[in-house]
Image: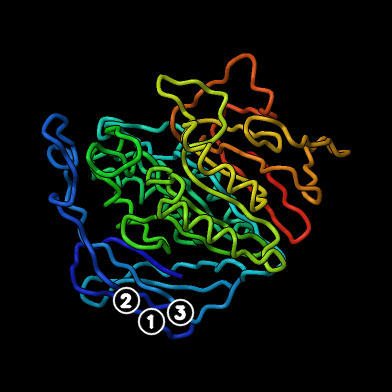
Amino acid sequence: MRLTWVSGDANPQQVQYGDGKSSTSEVATFTQDDMCSISVLPSPAKDFGWHDPGYIHSAVMTGLQPSQSYTYRYGSDSVGWSDTIKFRTPPAPGSDELSFVIYGDMGKAPLDPSVEHYIQPGSISVAKAVAKEIQTGKVDSIFHIGDISYATGFLVEWDFFLHLITPLASQVSYMTAIGNHERDYANSASVYVTPDSGGECGVAYESYFPMPAVSKDKPWYSIEQGSVHFIVMSTEHEWSEKSEQYNWMDEDLSSIDRSRTPWVIFIGHRPMYSSHGGILPNVDSNFVASVEPLLLNYQVDLVFFGHVHNYERTCAVYQGNCNGMPTKDASGIDVYDNSNYTAPVHAIVGAGGFSLDNFPNNGETWSISRVSEFGYARVHATRADMLVQVL
C-alpha cells in the first residue's frame, strides 16, 4: 500500500505502521517550468495560477495482509508527526468478495467561495456521504475516474481538494484515472486539443496520485481486488489501434484469468455512450470505433466512465444496439444475465460534484436508467454476482 502526503520539508520522512514497521519516503516536487503553455494561449499554471506545491512524499507499506486493519502515522521528529490513522487493506486478488465506491468529476467547494475560481457544488455533500460509507467498514476501495480537483492551472486548489478527500483517502485505497481537466492542453500530446488542464498537462495529477502505471505520462494500469479485474485507461492519451496504450489494453485483457477474477471492469473518463448533448460532443466516435471491439472480444462485464455530470446506465450494448436487456427481479432491481454474455453494460458516474448535466426528454434506445443528481455508485461483487447501487 502506497501512502502519499505533502510537506514543506524536502528531507525524507517516514511512515510508521503496523507492529513497529516503518518505510522511508521518496520525495518529489514539480516546478513552474514543468507546466505547459503556448504563446497564443498562455496558461494559468505557467503564470498567475502558479503555486509552489511543496514536497510530495510517497512511501510504500509492505508486508500487509489483505482485508486487515492497520494504524499508521507519517512525518519525522524534526517536522512532527501526523495523528495516528486507521486504514484497511483491500481484499486479495481472487478472494470471494469486494465492495467499492466509484465516482468521477468531483472537484471541491469552499466555505468561502471568494478564494476559488472554479467551484463544484456537490463535492462536499458527496465526500461526506462517502465518508459515512467508510465508517460502516464496508468499503474496501474508492475509484475516482477523472476530473479530480478541477484546479485547472490554479495549483493552490489541489491543496483544497486534497484536504476534502483526506477522510476518505487516508482510510482506504483511493484509485484514480486521468481526465481532461488533468491532462489536456495544446501541444501537449493530448488526444484532445483543449485548454482544460489550465497548463498542468498531467504533471500535478501524477505527482499527487502515483498510480501503478506503466511509466511517467502513461497513466494506464490494471489491478485485481477480490473477484474483480480492473483495467484503467487514459482517454486523453492515444488509444487508436496499434498505439502503445491500445496494445497494452489488448494484452492485459487477453491475460485475465477468469477463474481467479470472474468479473472484468473497464474504467476511463470520456464515455462511449451518453444521452446528454453538450456544446462539444461528449462521445468521440473514433474512440468508440477503436476501443469498443476490445470490450466485446474479451467479454468485459461492466464499463464505468465519467466526464458527463450525471448517472446513466445502458443495456448490454455494442455499436449502439442492445444485445441484451435486463429483467426485473422481485424487488424491482434490473438483473443482467452475464452467464449468457452478449455485450458490456456501460455506466456514467460523473455526478461526484460538478454542476449537473440534464437529459433530453427522449432517451436513446440503449439508455436504461438516467439520474441527474449528485452521488456515486456503490458496488458489491462476489464470485457469483455483482450489485451496483446508485446513491
Looking at the rendered structure, which numbered label has been put on residue 158? none
Q: Residue at x 29, y 66 (%)?
A: 57
The image position of residue 332, as x and y in percent, is 82, 35
| Horizontal side of residue 248 vs 238, given as left or right | right
The image position of residue 8, as x and y in percent, is 19, 62
Q: Residue at x 44, y 61 (%)?
A: 170
* First reached walking from the N terminus: tag 3 or tag 2: 2
**Residue identifier under label 3:** 62
Q: Amino acid at mark 1?
A: Ser
Q: Amino acid at mark 3?
A: Thr
Q: Badge 3: how crowded within 10 Å, few (<14), some, or many (20+)?
A: few
* First reached walking from the N terminus: tag 1 or tag 2: 2
Residue 308 in view here: no
Q: Residue at x 26, y 30 (%)?
A: 114
Q: Are marks 1 and 2 in contact (CB under 8 Å)?
A: yes
**Residue identifier under label 1:** 22
Of residues 104 and 296, the one nearer the viewer is 296
Q: Secondary structure at mark 1?
A: strand
